[in-house]
Amino acid sequence: MQCYFPWSQDLSVGLDEIDAQHKLLVDIINRVYEALINRASREEASNVLDDLVQYTYVHFAVEESLFRITNYLDYDDHKALHDHLKKQVLRIKQRFDAGEIKLDLTLMSFLRSWLEDHIKGEDKAYVAHLLGSGLKSAWAQPSWVGKIWGSLRA
């Protein structure tokens, strides 16, 4: 796979489950890049963008559930950011499917910044709260969402 957006330790929030989910998002963005480089058909590219939309929704739902369970005080603000980001990624998919945009380096740069800025900014801000609420940084089992997502995509 072509790697446009390598995972790096500075993207880690220090919570294994969330890091595993962020790695999957990074992987999907790299798949979008691979579709660009390999000049994938519009259908193939649309499918990868669909994966990005769907997994973004899944990941945000997990984070928001953790926020509700732990009474995160910034829940409303963070959820509003998620809602805005979901609309952005969905709009990209819709515009691509309508032929208004194509896969290009401008889109890739946006996707990378979108995820990187959110992880390094807003996501790292909630970690202390989740750990202080009793969430463990490491779990005995690997990412459950990754397992489910992988089985759906196989």
Image: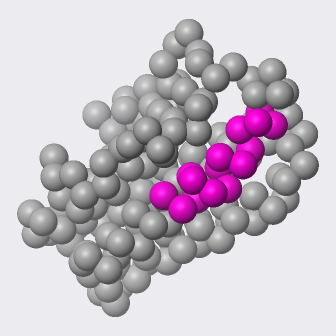
The outermost residue toward the front is 10
Asked if residue 113 can be seen in this view, the reply is yes
Q: Is residue 148 visible?
A: no
Q: Quadrant of the C terminus?
A: top left
Judge left or right: residue 116 versus residue 134: left
Count of numbered labels shown in the rendering: 0
Q: Quadrant of residue 93?
A: bottom left
Vertical order, 137 against 43 (above or below): above
Q: Position of residue 97 (x, y in %)?
A: 34, 78
Q: Indicate the position of residue 122 as horizontal and vertical percent values.
A: 67, 56
Q: Main secondary structure of the magenta part?
A: helix
Answer with left or right where residue 18 lies relative to residue 55.
Answer: right
Task: In this rendered view, identify the residue nearer to me: 90 or 133.
Answer: 133
With 17 as the anchor, is 67 left or right in this view?
Answer: right
From what the image shows, is residue 19 above or below residue 107? Answer: above
Q: Please tell me which residue is depicted at 47% across the width and 44% down the height of the picture.
A: 10
Any magenta on residue 121?
yes
Q: Is residue 147 above or below residue 96?
A: above
Q: Residue at x 32, y 80 (%)?
A: 106
Who's the residue at 49% across and 77% down the image?
91
Magenta stretch bounds: 116-130
Image quarter of residue 111: bottom left
The colouring scheme, among rainbow, by chain, secondary structure or one colour, is: one colour
60 lies above or below 66 = below
Can you give x and y, in whole percent of width and height, for residue 1 in the image? 16, 47
Please report the residue visible at 83 percent of the width from the left and 52 percent of the height from the top: 75
- Residue 148 image point, x, y percent: 46, 29
